[in-house]
Amino acid sequence: MTHKVLVLAGDGIGPEIVAEARKVLEALRRGFGLAVELEEGLVGGAAIDATGTPLPEATLRLAREADAVLLGAVGGPKWDDLPSERRPEKGLLGLRGGLGLFANLRPAVLYPELAAASTLRAEVVAGLDMLIVRELTGGIYFGEPRGIRTRPDGVREGVNTMVYSEPEIERIARVAFEAARRRGRRVCSVDKANVLEVSALWREVVTRVAADYPDVELAHMYVDNAAMQLVRAPRQFDVMVTGNLFGDILSDCAAMLTGSIGMLPSASLDAAGKGMYEPIHGSAPDIAGRGVANPLATILSVAMMLRHSLGEGELAGRVEAAVREVLAAGLRTPDIDGGEGTRRVGTKEMGDAVAAALLAQA
Ligand SMILES: NC(=O)c1ccc[n+]([C@@H]2O[C@H](COP(=O)([O-])OP(=O)(O)OC[C@H]3O[C@@H](n4cnc5c(N)ncnc54)[C@H](O)[C@@H]3O)[C@@H](O)[C@H]2O)c1
Ligand SMILES: CC(C)[C@H](C(=O)O)[C@@H](O)C(=O)O
Ligand SMILES: [Mg+2]
């Protein structure tokens, strides 16, 4: 069966990093007979420029028809003055919401070769392998009412609403407990239950779901403490489950423990396992067009796509092994502190090296 993948390069470094991910898919096709058909679509600023909207109907339709979506990044200063409804980011949120991709898996894994590049001391971070399970289609990102309004006294106010229903909390909790069963059997649920009612309900529902997983240990943590614990002693975490906004913030924080935000992939899944795959970072306007962006988060997102949506777990392992190999060979993009025995390379050279390492396995 031929897998249909929709590729949405997006903005900024998006096209540069996606080009390297395509090389990896091409190497899998040539070296291992992966049957994959790529289609391209527009999203974000690129879609605004071409069609006037960040998520054209055609893109959503192609995404629905595909087995999986691979996305680069969206956004950039060119579109920053648009009202939030028309910004590039709305295209990404529209895809997540429109496809029902409620479960966002963000693994933060330290490759041993990058221990010296972590913002933490090697002995604090060595062996780090945690998974952030972020709820992706609810919470304050999607709650109503929202907007900027003017009160009767003439004062303007901005409004967003954080809402989580019991079914929304229950289904993301189950994703976290199921993942924990395949890993270290520990779940830490992160909330702000000392202040927010939405978090009090979150805690209650997660605790209830935990009863179905007696083999998994559950802990609760307030989000402010969780941010601190991530940079104090991150190895205490196995699976962390949290809401949309907290998960966004904590995953950027966790990224730095692994050496660079350019290393963190993600999978956004629906109830049936269909998914969209993207690095957790953005369009990096400060380095776009210079050929220096780290493509590994996107390449590792391809590995997640192979495993979670295409039923090609063995090939996923091969991609991860190829990444390990190029890091062990000392290749580093400039976002990662090199040090002795390393060699600075650009985006293309890194992608070529991963593709070559893959073909060498064939
Ligand atoms: N999923 C997405 O598409 C996504 C995610 C986050 C931010 N954004 C958007 O991207 C734009 C820029 O946002 P930002 O600057 O806050 O975050 P960013 O993640 O784009 O960049 C933050 C910093 O990390 C660096 N960086 C990010 N990815 C890198 C990579 N692969 N290799 C090397 N360095 C990398 C950047 O150069 C920058 O210094 C905004 O419009 C934002 O809304 C999009
Ligand atoms: C661009 C933005 C909408 C997005 C988010 O906040 O979810 C990004 O920061 C991410 O982490 O994927
Ligand atoms: Mg983010």
Image: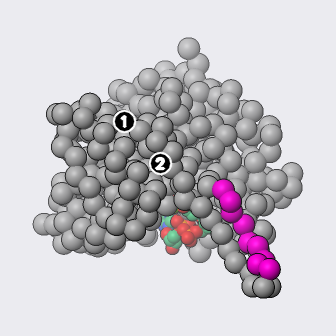
Main structural element of the magenta stretch: helix, strand or loop? strand
Q: CA distance from mark 2 to mark 1?
A: 11 Å
Q: Can residue 147 be found in the magenta stretch? A: yes
Quickly name the residue at label 2.
135
Amino acid type, residue under disc 2 in the picture = Glu
Return the x and y of residue 166 as percentages of the image width and height.
46, 42
What amino acid is at disc 1? Arg
Q: Position of residue 61 (x, y in %)?
A: 75, 33
Taking the image as drawn, is residue 130 in sight? no
Residue in the image at 49% along x and 55% along y: 244
- Position of residue 27 relative to residue 261, above or below, is above
According to the picture, the residue beneath numbered tag 1 turns out to be 174
Quadrant into which the C terminus falls: top left
Instruction: List the single residue furthest toward the top.
Output: 1
Viewport quadrant of the N terminus = top right
In what element is the residue under mark 1?
Answer: helix
Q: Quadrant of ligand 1?
A: bottom right
Q: Is residue 322 left or right of residue 163?
A: left
Horizontal and vertical percent position of residue 203: 34, 51
Whether label 1 lies within 8 Å of ligand 2 gets the answer: no
Q: Which picture quadrant has residue 88? A: bottom right
> At 36% from the left edge and 43% from the top edge, which residue is drawn?
205
Q: Is residue 174 left or right of residue 54?
A: left
Residue closest to the eye, 287 or 353: 287
Earlier sequence position, callout 2 versus callout 1: 2
Q: Residues within 10 Å of mark 1 (few under 14, many from 20)?
A: some
The answer to whether residue 93 of the structure is visible from this angle is: yes
Q: Quadrant of residue 256?
A: bottom left
Q: Which residues are magenta?
A: 144-152
